[in-house]
Image (cartoon, rainbow, N blue to C red):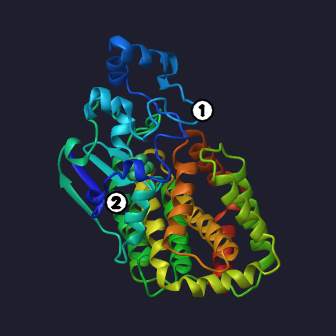
Amino acid sequence: MRYTTPTFYKEFKCIGGACEDSCCDNWEIDLDDESLKFYLSQKGEFGKRIKACTRVRDKQFILNGKRCPFHNDDDLCDLYIELGEKSLCQTCTNFPRHIEEFENLKEVSLTMSCPEASRIMLAKKEKMAFECKDGTDREYGLKELKPVSRFAFWKKGHENKLNKPLFEKLIVSRELVYDILQDRRLHVMERALKVLVYADELQKCIDDDNYDAIDSLTNKYKDNKKTKITTEDKKIAEINNMLSIINMYEGLENIIPDWKGILQLGFDHLKSDNYMQDVKEFLDYYKDKEYEFEHILVYYIFNYFLGASYDNDPLTKVKFAIISYLVIFELDVARWAANGKTFDYEDQVVVAHAYSKEVEHSYDNYESLQLVLSAHPILTVDNICSILECYIRQ
Ligand code: SF4
């Protein structure tokens, strides 16, 4: 098996009890069949405790409030203590790794929903790079189980078959998307805009079943095709669109307690009179840390773009990356304004990790968002371009 990972992948080490938002709280753990069988075969007092804490039909542990029933008062795992590290189920072993599978290739990243993984990624000033090597699940910290579902921590696998010819094209497209997103001569908003326009054209080639046209399209963008920015000032309409977008997140299932407050702050700030002035100031205040937003965009592209080889829809994957960036950006500006116009790397970790946990770790949230991104009239390419242009003009 080949494995593609970010080059910093192996720097990760769980900080356990020192973690401010343990992955053992606030969500339900799906148990793989092998682990469930092993747990149910345990005897004695601990075996009884496992049976009492397991909803076998749903293949899940029954949470103790919002906590995993085996997450003890010292913030340690009783399963690990009683049965050893190898006893951990696939979900717990693999976290915080995000896995995508394409036949004999696995792409594995560290998910931002783990604050420590966010810290590692966001601290890098250099451009995010990836490496692809032969290996085994064990070498990459993954539990060896077959079959491994598309999303390591979710229930469902790919329903569609891998479109191999498209996969080959998208590998090349994704390189171009990385190059654009990491072109530091441009502001991140401009890079996002350029990628969105490219993805829109790419989608048209796919919808027309014209895969041959993808090569020339990609070459055209490699040659630095300039993205036209309109001069018309439509600030109010764009702010209203952003309000609607933030509002969509309101309707998602709530995973972590702090999220509602973070979102509300963003919503209130968008409605404030000095919103645009704050955006302008924040862009200047945080300009030396633009690479954090670049990493967030590249992260979402790495995690999801190639998944379009299963559903033929790279445009929605790109929209997801850009909307995620825009929402995180908005929430950052709101936090900066509320903090007396200060904001640092740890604030970014709080917002980015909360966003990721809400959106990427609930199957329903992720799927609803994909549906909305592909069909909602506010989330057309033109509207998202207008929002980006509005910020570029600041
Ligand atoms: S969220 Fe990350 S650092 Fe925190 S306990 Fe889980 S794996 Fe460890």
Secondary structure at numbered mark 2: helix
- Circle 2: residue type: Ile
Could one spot residue 184 in this view of the protein? yes
Of all residues shown, which one is farthest toward the front?
74
Could one spot residue 309 in this view of the protein? no
- Circle 1: residue type: Gly
Residue identifier under label 1? 65
Q: Which mark is residue 171?
A: 2
Question: Residue at left 26%, top 45%?
Answer: 141
Q: Where residue 172 sits: x, y (%)?
A: 34, 64
Of all residues shown, which one is farthest toward the left?
134
Question: Residue at left 38%, top 59%?
Answer: 170
Left or right, residue 374 beside residue 202: right
Question: Residue at left 34%, top 11%?
Answer: 44
Q: Nearer the viewer, mark 1 or mark 2?
A: 1
**Sequence-wise first label, 1 or 2:** 1
Question: In this picture, is 107 found above or below 203?
Answer: above
In the picture, which quadrant includes the C terminus?
Answer: bottom right
Question: Residue at left 42%, top 40%?
Answer: 74
Question: In this picture, is 274 found above or below 294?
Answer: below
Q: Which is nearer the eye, 15 or 74?
A: 74
Q: Where residue 152 sits: x, y (%)?
A: 40, 40
Determine if the C-beta at disc 1 is less than 8 A from ligand 1.
Answer: no
Q: Where residue 200 sits: x, y (%)?
A: 55, 65
Tell me the CA gap for discs 1 and 2: 43 Å
Left or right, residue 252 beside residue 222: right
In the picture, which quadrant includes the N terminus?
Answer: top left
Secondary structure at numbered mark 1: loop
